[in-house]
Amino acid sequence: MNRIASVQVPDFGRSETLPDLPLDEYRARLDAATGRMQRDSLDILIVYADREHSATLAFLTGFDPRFEEALLLLDTAGRRLLLVGNECLGYLPDPSLGLDVELFQELSLLGQQRDGSRPLAAILGDFGVGAGRNVGCVGWKYFEAGLVDDPDRAIEIPSYVVDALRALTGDRGSVRNATALFMNPDDGLRLTNSADQIARFEFAATRTSESVLDVVRHLEPGTSEADLARLMRGDVLPQSCHPMLSFGEKARRGLSSPSHLRAARGDTYTTAFGIWGALTCRAGVVGNRRDDLPDGVADFYPAYVANYFDAVVAWYQTVTVGAVAGDVFAAVEAARDASLWHRAVNPGHYIHLDEWMHSPFTPGSQTVLRSGVALQMDIIPVSNGPFCYANVEDGIVLADDALRAELAGRHPAAWKRIDARRTFMTDALGIALDVSVLPLSNMPAWLPPYALDLDHALVASR
């Protein structure tokens, strides 16, 4: 069992500029994708992207199609063709990356001209899609047996693209879902991050955490959700999901966007803000003490939030490079009091440019957590008693000796902030972190159970 103690979150600082990601890293990612194609006996890979689902294309090229769509075609000989719509012709990746570019106007918005590009079948055929070829399609999701028939052939990218591919490959070829090449929880190409990518994620996490911290610091009775939402600032990075902020009964719908509702003493609150590479969430009650809560909630909430933090501590003290994900799941379940709350989803997940890439944290999972993975401590505690809520979602990276040394050498200021966060979590919050755990948030694991008393937060028992 934990306790409430006097704890103020320090000012850890931030980078004022987004760290660069060298073009050589994108080249290495494209080469790695070609290598995986050869391993998986794929002749051609088709990577689809749109406004919502651009993370894999951006991972490979640094390019996202804004409000259009795009297709990246790769073959095992090293050819790389990017298909874009009308407006993205003026917004292309660095030409030194070596991508060929062609206009395919059906990737454009409705009503725009369609008279300046070749038919899709002609483009695909010239790239080598034909009878007997094995083609992999990459979108944002792959499927497993159980709910979908023939999951390898179930493809989530637009059907007209899949139809064209299957018409060209015929009965002797195959067109299958290859999204797992990038996103599977064991060795997907997007799982492990370089020192430079980690520095960019740290930049993102400082923005999301400081935004949420500002919201919590300005939260008081009478303040509107809209007023507080103005404090959410992503700087130069796009949002990875809609901003979330709710008070009172509205907080039951935790994914809700801000409205003009005003907070009242005793309300439950929840807020979250995500940009590419980071998300921070906090939830609790609008009050100074237990006596501010409604009848029924006042008798339940202290035990509920305390046991939730027990599970959070168990998560942080179990994750490490080399940990088995199923053991992390089991540690959280062992700490959870099932009479008080149940989990909404998995106790944590991988994060990348997209907010939820995959989760290895399932019962009995044998996935081994690798050096370089970015993880979210994302345990969502659904009350088994009266409605109330708590949340302390933050991001970390796991890094072995070599990656930590590289990060410290290439990004010393970020490393200094990470080290200070580790000290805060260990010394002030009492959470025993493995040396491989690198906190990215500027309020790491800091959970004041009463949002009007920010001088006190939950700490682990020593």
Image (cartoon, rainbow, N blue to C red):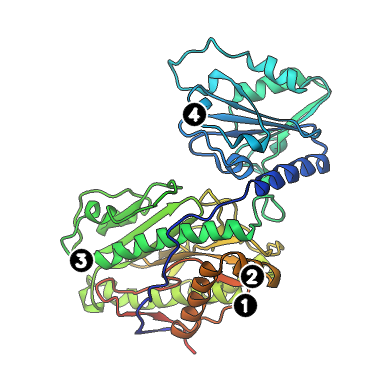
Query: Front-most of 154 and 354?
Result: 354
Q: How far, Cα to Cα, is label 1 from label 2?
A: 9 Å
Which dot marks residue 435? 1
Q: CA distance from mark 4 to mark 3?
A: 41 Å
Q: Which residue matches tag 2?
A: 404
Query: Whole-percent x and y of residue 82?
Result: 63, 29
**For numbered disc 4, what is the local secondary structure?**
loop
Q: Tell me: residue 270, above or below residue 136.
A: below
Mark 3 or mark 2, earlier in chain: 3
Residue 384 location (% of width, % of height): 40, 66
Element type where label 1 sits in the image: loop
Label 2: few (<14), some or many (≥20) within 10 Å? many
- Name which residue type carries label 3: Glu
Residue at x 38%, y 67% (from the top left corner): 390
Farthest left residue in view: 222
Query: Which of the two discs, 1 and 2, labels the residue nearer the N terminus?
Result: 2
Whole-angstrom CA distance, mark 3 to mark 1, is: 38 Å
Residue density around tag 1, few if under 14, some if 14–19, many if 20 or more, within 10 Å: some
Image coords of residue 54 (percent x, y):
55, 39
Q: Residues within 10 Å of mark 4 (few under 14, many from 20)?
A: some
Q: Amino acid at mark 1?
A: Val
The mark that comes first in sequence, 4 or 2, is 4
Give the labeled residue for mark 3.
Answer: 220
Distance between the Cα atoms at labels 3 and 2? 40 Å
Query: Could you tell which of marks 1 and 4 lies nearer the N-terminus?
Result: 4
Which residue position is annotated with label 4? 68
Labelled pair 1, 2 in contact (Cβ < 8 Å): yes
Query: What secondary structure is found at the residue carrying circle 3?
Result: loop
Tell me if mark 3 has few (under 14), some (14-19) or many (20+) residues whose alpha carbon lies within 10 angstroms of its own.
some
